[in-house]
Amino acid sequence: SQMQRFNAGEYTDCPVFDGVLEFSSLSTGASLDGAVQLAQGQCDIAVNWSGGLHHAKKSEASGFCYVNDIVLAILELLKVHARVLYIDIDVHHGDGVE
């Protein structure tokens, strides 16, 4: 099924719930907005306290992460910077950022 294909649903660590699309859109949008503002020199620091969902893969939810906002923000920053340093301060591996 589609749910299994994307690792979402009742028997995974990525349950589907009312508002999951809105939650993912807002969280990801905030990270992208921060990256755009950084890239355009509108700010020196951008923080998204609801972001950092570093387990989601390109085509698969994982570890309660539905969209990997970090990767999308890094891709946005790479449009204007040759390199981007990503430092994960979580206590475990952010496998979706590899």
Image (tube, rainbow, N blue to C red):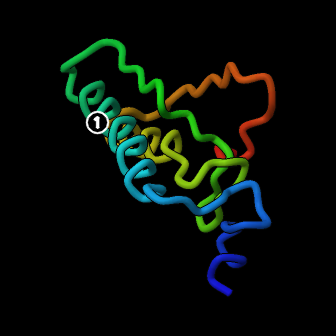
Looking at numbered disc 1 in the image, what kind of residue is underneath it?
Answer: Asp
Residue at the extreme top: 44
Q: Quadrant of the N terminus?
A: bottom right
Q: Give the residue drawn at x 47%, y 59%.
A: 18
Image location of residue 44, percent across then percent down: 31, 12
Question: Residue 35: x percent and y percent?
Answer: 34, 33
Q: Residue at x 65, y 71 (%)?
A: 6
- Figure quadrant of residue 4: bottom right
Which one is in front, 83 or 71? 71
Give the residue at the far bottom of this rendering: 1
Q: Is residue 30 left or right of residue 23?
A: left
Q: Secondary structure at mark 1?
A: helix
- Identity of the residue drawn at 65% across and 59% down: 15
Which of these two is toward me, 24 or 97? 24
Instruction: Give how far across and how far down residue 25 sits, in percent.
Output: 37, 51
Q: Nearer the viewer, residue 79 or 90?
A: 90
Is 52 situated above or below 72?
above
Q: Residue at x 55, y 26 (%)?
A: 85
Q: Which residue is mark 1?
A: 33
Q: Position of residue 48 (x, y in %)?
A: 42, 26
Front residue of 48/72: it is: 48
